[in-house]
Image (cartoon, rainbow, N blue to C red):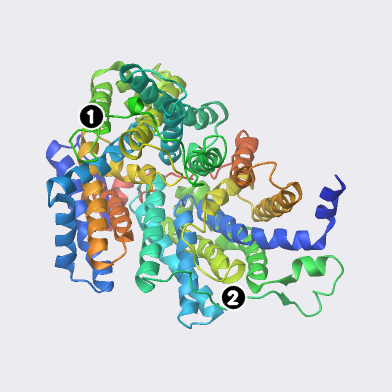
Amino acid sequence: MIRFEPREPASLKRLILIPTIAAVTALILASIPIAAAGLSVFEAYWLMATGAFGSLFTFTEMLTRATPLILTGLAAALAFRAKLWNIGAEGQLYAGALAAVAVGSGWIDAPTYVLLPIVVFSGALAGGLVMLGPTLLKTRLGVDEVVTTLLLNFIIILFVQMMLEGPMKDPMGMGWPQSEPMLDAAALPKLLPRMRIHAGLIIALISALGIYILLKRTVWGFEIRAVGENANAARHAGVPVTGTFIKVGLLSGALAGLAGVGEVAGLKGYLTADLSPGFGYSGIVVAMLAGLSPIGVIFAALFIASIFVGADSMSRATGVSNYLADLIVAMSLICVLISGIFLRFKVRFIGRKSVEGAGK
Amino acid sequence: MSDIFDILLSINFWNAALRISTPLIFGVIGALVCERAGVLNLGIEGIFTAGAMAGWMAVWLGAGLWGGVLVAALAGAFFGLIHAILTVPLGLSQHVSGIGVTLFATALSYFTYRTALPDVSSPPRIEAFKAIDVPGLSDLPIVGPILFQQTPMTILALVIVAVTAFVLYRTPLGLAIRAVGDNPSAVESQGLSVYGLRIGAVVVGSSLMALGGAFLTMSAFDAFFFGMVNGRGWICIALTVFASWKPGKALIGALLFGAFDAFQVRLQTEIGTIIPGQIFLMLPYILSIAALVLVARKADYPRALLVPYFRGQR
């Protein structure tokens, strides 16, 4: 018989140890599919490690991949703190990218220091507004936000396809459904010459710090945590629960929207309907690996990004499918969920008798 | 206008509506069984994918069509067991665990497919289920061609609805499952195992979800495509709420959905390209949200849904 006893607030050591153990466990478990694909496990991991950390270029590629993951990770972490289940970061990312392209590809002509803030703000606003809908449906009508945010992902991606085949199609795009390129003045600057790494990373890091300060140091952050722990108790204590949900929803959506801005204004330069290989969903894994800590999100995003970049490189070298990366990421989530039990509870193995005694 | 009536009055249309709603019937009944026992299973989208892949691959490897159905159900049971262990004895967040199972099942299915078939340009095809005439019944006027000129999996789906309704409302097991989703401590005080009932319900429900996926690759189409589930699982979760967790209403909800889908496809060919095709493709998702909003105020959730239960705890 196993019994869980709540622990005191978890120590920093355990906060770091638990996700590390989960990540290592996921990597060990991934050796099964690697071996099944007929590859030497050590060779595969060596190729993955050099693929992510082997040179300055691969390292910057990894950071470039981590940029949207930090932002979608923050979107999930903030929302989950308040127990607002925003599973719609994927759609919000596309909404942000669409808005960024709409204002940044010639509609407004202005110098960079005017245009770039407008582009960034529009993307964040679009993401926030997309999340406002499900949040209002939850607070006003009691509609479960999990399903509405999930379904909105499909609606928004179809909407993006419609815009890219219709009004926003690039007439010079050789018939491909893609947007017009963004103006140079609307582009996020590159951080290093000849590398793809861009200023979106700075935005992501500042966002993480901002959310950290918000949650730790402000009244509003306290209210978010109170709502997340027990919405009814928070309401009785005078916390504006509905207002908190709406603010969290807007901010969470805005963070995911920023991820979309970074991908179009920093990396691609134009919008296609396959912009995101599931950054919104991976963001949930990032947030859970980070234990919903905003600073932890940075490190979790770096881990997930190195898996993706490393697996891509390994896949090119060996021909083993890069769906291996998705598999490792999914297993990391399940492993961190299980190991989280050891973070929140002391696990005691005890006799059945003493449990019956405790129940009375 | 008369075109629309022609569509709605044609037997062909209603036959298609039932065919299109078949995966949803499997999925919504599967979700209902899990949720009636108190466990939300957001693994559904991934379990659909796993059922579609596993069933198809078993047939492709020579297991026979019913062998494929069995393999799909076992794949569903496997992922259901993972979700059940995480959420029932371990009491973890059903939302996050479900998303985890969806990511895991999807990634494992895609990885397996790509590893088995590294370089195929077009997906290999199998000899899929064909529509059969049920002897005696398929000759009935109107009802015959609609209900009994279907593939065996559609008929299986209808049988499963009836069996689920019977078990849930007419057997002691069904009473226990419904009770465990409403008031688990009352079930334990009767000497029944809350864990056992919940794990069992999630495993069985997940197998049914996987059959919905298997229908896609073994009945609706004859091959596996990436992204072919395309949100059907999430739509089933919405339909379960819409159906107030009742099998009969679930069937009606899925049929309405199938009818709507069949209708929009026909309408699209009538109207042509005036309206962008994506608008039509969005409709099922918009309709699901509308269905949720419609019933939100009076939704009668199983009272212990999402609430973990720990032994010896009141």
Position of A230 relative to B102 (above/below): above
B55 left or right of B278 in image = left
Could you say whether the residue bearing mark 2 is in a helix, strand or loop? loop
Q: Position of residue B274 (x, y in %)?
A: 70, 41
Position of A221 relative to B9 (above/below): above
- Mark 1 residue crowding within 10 angstroms, few (<14) / some (14–19) / many (20+): few
A213 left or right of A82 in image = left
Residue sitting at x 45%, y 24%: A246
B41 left or right of B267 in image = left
Residue A342 visible, this angle = no
The label number, if any, that marks residue B128 in the structure image: 2
Q: What amino acid does circle 2 point to?
A: Ala
**Which residue was labeled with disc 1?**
A202
Q: What amino acid does circle 1 point to?
A: Ile
Q: Position of residue B91 (x, y in %)?
A: 35, 49
- Considering the image in quadrants, where does the N terminus of chain B appear? top right
Provide the chain ID for the residue under circle 2.
B
Label 1 and label 2: CA atoms lie apart by 53 Å
